[in-house]
Image (cartoon, rainbow, N blue to C red):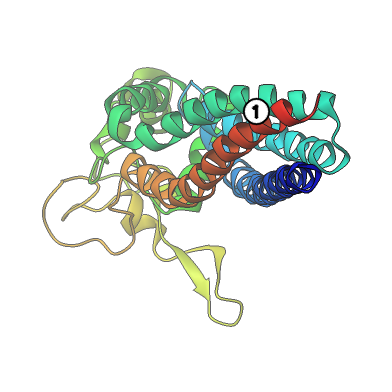
Amino acid sequence: MKQAFIAVENGLCHKACCTRAVGDLSCLFSLILGICTLMVSLMAIYTHGEVTRTFGINLYYGMYIVLFASLCTIWTAFLGMCGMSAKNRFFVIVLVAGSILLIIILLIGLLLVLLFPYLAGDNVGAVMLKNLKDNYGTLAVITTSWDYLQGYLLCCAVEDNGWSAWRDSKWFLDENSVLLDDTQTIPASNPAYRMVPKSCCYRKLDYLTRQLTDEYENLDRCQNWQYGPPKFTTGAHNDAIYYRGCLPTIQAYIKRFSFWIMLFGFCTFFFLITSTTIGCITLQQIR
C-alpha cells in the first residue's frame, strides 16, 4: 500500500515537473518572440516616423499597440519563468492574468496593422490629398513630411500618375503666381512654371556608395515638360519624374513589415495561450 502511494506521489511529482518544464519553455519562446516583435515594430515606427504626419491621423496605432504588447509580453514571460521555476503562486497569477490581457491587446494590434492596407486606403487617400492641396507649402511640418515621403519612397502625389493633384494645390498657386497678382498664374510656356515640387523628381545615383545624391537627373524636364507628364497623364515617357503614387507605395511597405509582425505576433499569440493554459494547471498544483 505504501509503495503504491509512493508510486502515485512520484507520478504526480513527475507530471508537475513536466508541466512546469513545458511552462518554462513556453515562457522562454514568448520572451524571444516578444523581443523579435519589439524589434520589428521599432524598425517600422523609426523608419516611417515622418510618414504619419502626412495623413493627419496616426497610421501606426496598430504598430504602437503591438510595440506596447511586446514589451508587456517580455516582462510577463520573465515573471512567468520565475514563477514556474520557484513555484511562486503570485508570479504564476501575474503570468495568467497578464497573458489573457496581452492576448486581447496583441490581437487588436495585429488586426489593426494587417487590415489597414485593405480597409483604410480610401480614407487615408482622402486625408493625404487634402493635406497636399491645403497645407503643402503653407505648413512647414506638412511640407517637410511630404518632401521626406516622396524623396524616401520615390513617389509623387497620392495615386499612381496623380501629378494633376499638385495643380489643384495652394503650393501651385503660390509657386506660379504673377507678381503683384496672386490670383493669376504665369503661362505654362514660362521657364519658371512649376507643376510639381522637386521631391517628385529623380535624383542622381552615386555609383560608388549606391546612395541617392541631392542632384536631380533633369529638374526642368521633371517640373515643366510640354510633351507628357506632369502636364499630361499620357504622352511621351518622362524619365525625370516619379510615376508611382505614395499611397500604393506606403501600402506595399506596410504589407512588407506586416508579414514579419504577423509571423512573430501570431507565434507570440500561440505561446501566450500555451503559457496561460500551463499557468492555470500550475496554479492547481501550487497550493
Q: Is residue 65 left or right of residue 235?
A: right
The quadrant in which the N terminus is found is top right
Q: From the viewer's perspective, is residue 124 above or below residue 246?
A: above
Residue at point 76%, 37% (across, down): 80
Residue 26 showing in the rendered view: yes
Q: Is residue 222 left or right of residue 84?
A: left
Occupied quadrant, residue 116: top left
The residue to which callout 1 is attached is 280
Find numbered disc 1 in the image and state the secondary structure of the residue it sits on: helix
Q: From the viewer's perspective, is residue 144 above or below residue 58?
A: below
Residue at point 74%, 33% (across, down): 76
Occupied quadrant, residue 73: top right
At label 1, which amino acid type do we have? Cys
Residue 54 position within the rendered picture, expressed as x and y whole percent measured from the top left: 48, 30
Most distant residue in the front direction = 1
Residue situated in front as seen by the camera: 239 or 279: 279
Residue situated in front as seen by the camera: 173 or 276: 276
Most distant residue in the bottom direction = 208
User: For mark 1, does the 10 Å Cα neighbourhood hold few (<14), some (14 to 19), or many (20 or more) residues?
Assistant: some
The quadrant in which the C terminus is found is top right
Q: Is residue 33 left or right of residue 244?
A: right
Residue 118 position within the rendered picture, expressed as x and y whole percent measured from the top left: 29, 34
Residue at point 61%, 32% (across, down): 276
Residue 199 position within the rendered picture, expressed as x and y whole percent measured from the top left: 46, 48
Q: From the viewer's perspective, is residue 24 above or below residue 58?
A: below
Occupied quadrant, residue 180: top left
